[in-house]
Amino acid sequence: MNITIGTTKIDIELQYLQGGRWVSAFSESGNPVSIALKEHPDYVDYALPLNSEEETKVRLSASPAESRNAFHVIPCCIYGDNNAAEVHAGEFPLLCEEKGEDVFRASRWEFRADRAAMPLSAICTEKGVLAVTVDPYTLFGSAAGTSFANMSWNAAGNASETASVSAAGNASGTAPVSVAGNASETAPVSVAGNASGTEVVPNGVFAELPNVCGISMGYTNDPISFINKRTPGPSTEAFVCKGEVKGRIYFVPARDADNPRLSLHEIIRREYALRHERPAYQKSFRDAVKGCLRSFAQISWNPETEEYTNCNCLPPENPVLHPWRNVKEIGWTGGGVLAYPLVLAGEILGEEGKKLLSGAAAGGQMFDKITSVFHEDSGLLFDLTSPIDTDRVKDRYNGASGLAHQEVSAADENGRWVNGWWAEFGLARDVHCAYTVGSAVHYLLKTIDFLTREGKSYPENWLDKARKTIDTVILLQREDGAFGYTYRTDRKEVADWNGFAGCWFVPCAAYLYHLTGEEKYLQAADKALDYYGEAVRTLTCNGTPMDTWKSPDEEGNLAYIRGARLLHEYTGREKYLTALKNGADYEFLWRYGYRTKPMYKPIADGWNACGGSITSVSNPHIHPMGMIVDSDLYYLGKVSGDSYYTERALDGTAWIMQTLELYPEKTGYGQYGVLSERWCPSDGLVIQKDSNGDFYSSWYSYNLWAAAAAFEEVCERCLDDTELSMCVGRV
């Protein structure tokens, strides 16, 4: 059948599973599922009541009548074909024609709906954006009895021309849910965890070439279950007999003819208003600052090596955190990421902070190490502050926990070093990573800016090395504004242009413009923001973290948001405010806007995914790093007068605060201030098991870059209530 939204015709199909085959609910009478519709100017409410004597699944699919250049989006999962031409085979789902033996290439992908930051599947066309949304869970066994006033629909194109809209109620009897296809090493679907005690079954979202999007009641991970990067699992599915699911079908016309995909953000905004639920927390920001600092000093600092270290353990048998790997990177996964909040904490806590640090390295000491590894040949900072040991770091917990890493030493005969842990993936060696270097310089300059505004001194060498590094980057900047993805180590030359990681140099150049007044830095930042802005507007931000190579990701956009905010703050130009809005809206395609129902401890009871951000299509877990732009979202909310951005920043802050409070009571290890990198809101990356063999929806680890992102967030929120707040975007 077809419906009309505005002036756009949408073909829809409703099917249910019967005897192992999909049957159209529009082709015959007496079907167990029916559809109720209520029309609005640019969307249609739908309800799907189901009353089946046998376990089944239901699919509602939609296709735009005109779909030239169709671009599929399932937030966190599918962005077009997921950059299929550039990524390595066998890494993660690619929506494209099947080719060879790569199980991750398929023309149709379906996921549990709670894999998506907003439970929807969309198709972006030149005319606008079609999207079908769904409640992420079906309450099964409930009485459905749905009715919409002024129900209307167009049956043209229905094969039988006799179908009717039905709002018939379901029987109230309780029906079981069935789960099939789980392997022993794959976390099964859970139907528990609803706060009210009502059992639920997850629903699904799917995308199919060339131009079909849709949702399912029940779900199937199809064609396989994407568990983790390079890790497919058998397809899992869930069935239901009786229940009801609701959602909406949208078609939002293109508001910007040059960037029609931007209309998707309007749909995300509307769904957020309907679905969001902010996480709750108890402790104060100052408590959080003290907890993070105490954990850095008491647990992460390794006095034997005089380095900060990541840690791991394996409860319940072995709940004590032990050193796993020294953190020697200058940025991204260490270095400046850690040093900046350490400096802020010192200003917030004063003498109390000095006592808590207890002999561990202070932020200023870390920046001294970072700036000491400037390499004259490349004109950039080395990626490491010292070589990483070549031997695998061993302790008795690594084998069971899966945390063992083959460390890589990239030191040459002269003792120089580049790369870090990510080189072990075999993707790039002996090159400078723009993400690592850019992140380090960004936090160095952010710290200088903070100290300057507070009337505090800093070593002249810090600014000198930051300028030299960015001068090299600008020297090599391409005419179209692009910075490099990787750089040569033996000469000033870009090794690879293709990736978003170079965007991290944008906020660096913006800071230097502000600190020095030199126009060349503003010009470079402006050109680069225009270049990277095209990917942000077209939803094709690919290639920031080196371990995920060229996959669509969220992390480069964090630099874009930061750069746009600074440029707007320093110049007041409207173009930068527009860029900041675009960056924020792209972030919300990765940031959860609703509560999910995780399956396993420590987050199966009470924890809320709303406000947490997924890192990439390659790593299907929430990471704390997305919160580093909350100060910029608060700024955007203030200067634009649009409370939507403030609300979503508040979600991020609340997500961090409630997640910190899981330690140690619910996590089973650590203390307040400890934080893992991995939080699994759905069934993706649920691979960690405790020593008893039970699944765990996080990671028995203490990852310093993850904890540092939380540390940065709580420091900046704490400073918002003091006279020290100018540099961090006080609202």
Image (cartoon, rainbow, N blue to C red):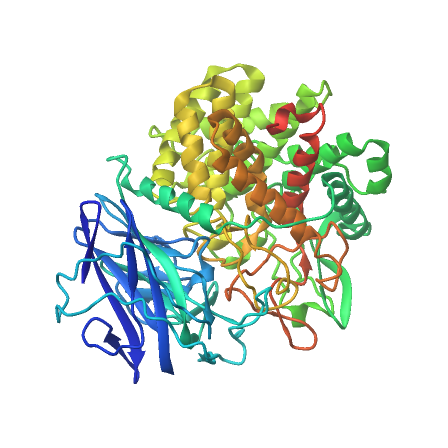
Residue positioned 24% across, 35% down in the render? 257
Q: Is residue 539 above or below residue 602?
A: above
Q: Say whether residue 477 is visible.
A: no
Q: Image quarter for residue 483? A: top left
Residue positioned 59% across, 54% down in the render? 421
Q: Say whether residue 105 is visible.
A: yes
Q: With 536 as the anchor, is 301 left or right in this view?
A: right
Given residues 183 and 308, the one toward you in this image is: 183
Number of callouts in the render?
0
Residue positioned 54% across, 29% down in the render? 635
Q: Position of residue 549 (x, y in %)?
A: 44, 52
Instruction: Say which quadrant the C terminus sits in.
Output: top right
Q: Image quarter for residue 91? A: bottom left
Q: With 579 as the anchor, is 62 left or right in this view?
A: left
Q: Position of residue 259 (x, y in %)?
A: 28, 37
Given residues 7 and 405, the one toward you in this image is: 7
Q: Position of residue 128 (x, y in %)?
A: 25, 44
Q: Position of residue 667 (x, y in %)?
A: 70, 62
Q: With 475 as the anchor, is 681 left or right in this view?
A: right
Q: What residue occupies the far front of the structure in this picture?
A: 149
Instruction: Say which quadrant the N terminus sits in.
Output: bottom left
Given residues 488 and 471, the one toward you in this image is: 471
Q: Is residue 434 above or below residue 470?
A: below
Given residues 52 and 283, the one toward you in this image is: 52
Q: Image quarter for residue 681? A: bottom right
Q: Is residue 282 above or below residue 190?
A: above
